[in-house]
Structure formats: structure tokens, C-alpha cells
Image (spheres, grey):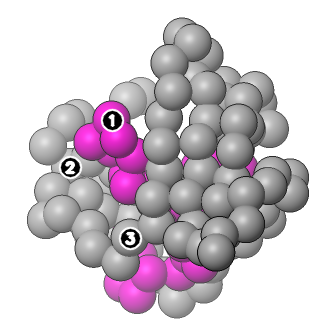
Amino acid sequence: MSSIEWDGYDNHLGENHRRSTDGERGIVVTDTPVDVLYEGTNGRYYTDCQVTTNLRTERWKPCIRQRDPDRRLVETSDGGLLLLTPTDDLPAWAEIRVDNRGTRVVDTRRPLPK
């Protein structure tokens, strides 16, 4: 049996990170310092910090949170639906970084925004 509800926002930031040695801004995480990593149905990955930020800034609006299995359905700013499912696996092109914006997943195939 699964329970479905929305309980507000998560406030988790991690530890166990180091400064980047590749000249990039911020910090590269050696051991995942986040409680949850999410895989979105849009092919992107998010930390719990990114999910919280998107909800607080109202870029996303919560629709449903299911706890068993843990999944979140959010409405994006363009009116689409995005299903977020926890994952332990990050693709080789993704990297977790910590900077002044918090803990986030960065797609290393694209240049960083300035």
C-alpha cells in the first residue's frame, strides 16, 4: 500500500565535498552529500536542494508526493508535468557540485552558465 501526500519542502544540504581541481567555480563532490538524487522524466537529474529551490521559487508547483515508492509529481513553469524518482545512479556526464547556489547536478556535456 502506498501513501500519497505533499508534506512541504525538504531542507537537506550535504557535506563531504572538496574544491574543484578543474578550474571550475564551486566545489566538486567526492561522496554524494545529498540525501536524495532524483531522476526526472525530462532526462535531467536533480539534488534534493534543487528540488527545494525550484519549489520555493515557484518554478515548480507540487502536485503529488508518493512515499512508497518515493516519487514526486510537479508542474513546471511552462505548465508541463515532471515526475521525479529517487535514484542512486548518476550518468558519467553528470557531476554533483556545491557552490553559492547550493548542491546541484551539473551536466558536464554543456558549458556552465556565467
Could you give the CA–CA distance between mark 2 and mark 3, rounded to whole angstroms?
19 Å
Q: Please, is residue 63 above or below residue 78 in the view?
A: below
Magenta span of residues: 27-53
- Residue name at image x 69 percent, y 45 percent: 64
Q: Looking at this view, is 101 or 86 the one in front?
A: 86
Residue located beneath label 2 in the image:
108
Displayed quadrant of residue 38: bottom left
Residue located beneath label 1 in the image:
42
Task: Tell me the quarter of the image containing the N terminus.
Answer: bottom right
Could you give the CA–CA distance between mark 1 and mark 2, rounded to whole angstroms?
17 Å
Label 1 crowd (10 A; few <14 / some 14-19 / many >=20): few
Residue type, mark 2 in image: Thr
Name the spot of residue 40 as percent of width and height, x first. Answer: 39, 46
Residue type, mark 1 in image: Asn
Residue located beneath label 3 in the image:
87
Name the spot of residue 98 as percent of width and height, x first. Answer: 52, 63
